[in-house]
Image (spheres, rainbow, N blue to C red):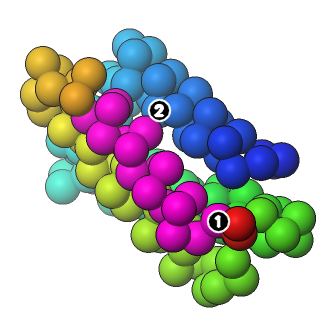
C-alpha cells in the first residue's frame, strides 16, 4: 500500500517495468490477446488480466490511500478504471511496437503524476 503520492508512482512504474520487460509476461499477454477470440478460458483470463484484475488491485490501493487521506474520496471503481485503462493501453502499445516502449513508459509515468495532481490531497 503506497504511503505517499510519490509511492503510488513508484509502485506503478515498478509494476509497469516488470510487465513490459519480463519475457514470460510479454508472451502470456500476446498469447491471451490472440487466443481470446478462439477460446472461452483465454477470453476470461484476458479480461481478468487486462481489465478487471487491474481494476480490483487499484480499487484496493486507492481505498487505502483514501483512508490515509492521500487522495480525494471518489468512486473507487471508477478511479481504478480511469487509472489502469490508459496504462494498460500503453503496455499493449509496447507489445505491438517495441520501439515505442521507452516513450510509452515515460507517458505512463507522466500520466501517473497527472492523476496524482488531479486526485491527490494537497
- In this rendering, the answer to whether 41 lies above or below 110 is below
Decide which of 33, 99 is in the foreground and name it.
Answer: 99
Q: Quadrant of the C terminus?
A: bottom right
Q: Which residue is mark 2?
A: 16
Instruction: Check if residue 97 falls in the magenta segment.
Output: no
Instruction: Check if residue 113 falls in the magenta segment.
Output: yes
Where does residue 112 sit, x and y in percent of width and height? Answer: 48, 50
Task: Assess whether mark 2 and mark 1 are in contact (beta carbons under 8 angstroms).
Answer: no
Q: Earlier in the sequence, mark 1 or mark 2?
A: 2
The answer to whether residue 74 is visible is yes
Which residue: 58% across, 41% down? 9
Q: Residues within 10 Å of mark 1 (few under 14, many from 20)?
A: some
Which residue: 77% across, 48% down? 4
Residue 24, quarter of picture: top left
Which residue: 33% across, 56% down? 86
Q: Which residue is mark 1?
A: 120
Which residue: 77% across, 64% down? 70
Decide which of 77, 51 is in the foreground and name it.
Answer: 77
The answer to whether residue 45 is visible is no
Q: Which residues are magenta?
A: 104-120
Where does residue 97 sit, x and y in percent of width and height? Answer: 11, 28
Image disc number at residue 68: none
Amino acid at each position: 500500500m503506497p504511503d505517499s503520492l510519490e509511492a503510488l508512482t513508484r509502485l506503478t512504474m515498478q509494476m509497469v517495468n516488470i510487465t513490459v520487460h519480463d519475457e514470460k509476461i510479454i508472451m502470456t499477454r500476446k498469447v491471451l490477446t490472440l487466443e481470446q477470440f478462439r477460446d472461452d478460458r483465454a477470453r476470461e483470463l484476458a479480461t481478468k488480466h487486462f481489465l478487471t484484475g487491474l481494476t480490483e488491485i487499484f480499487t484496493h490501493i486507492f481505498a487505502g490511500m483514501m483512508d490515509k487521506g492521500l487522495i480525494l474520496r471518489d468512486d473507487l471503481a471508477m478511479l481504478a478504471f480511469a487509472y489502469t485503462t490508459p496504462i494498460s493501453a500503453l503496455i499493449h502499445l509496447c507489445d505491438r511496437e517495441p520501439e515505442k516502449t521507452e516513450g510509452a513508459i515515460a507517458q505512463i509515468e507522466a500520466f501517473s503524476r497527472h492523476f496524482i495532481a488531479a486526485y491527490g490531497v494537497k
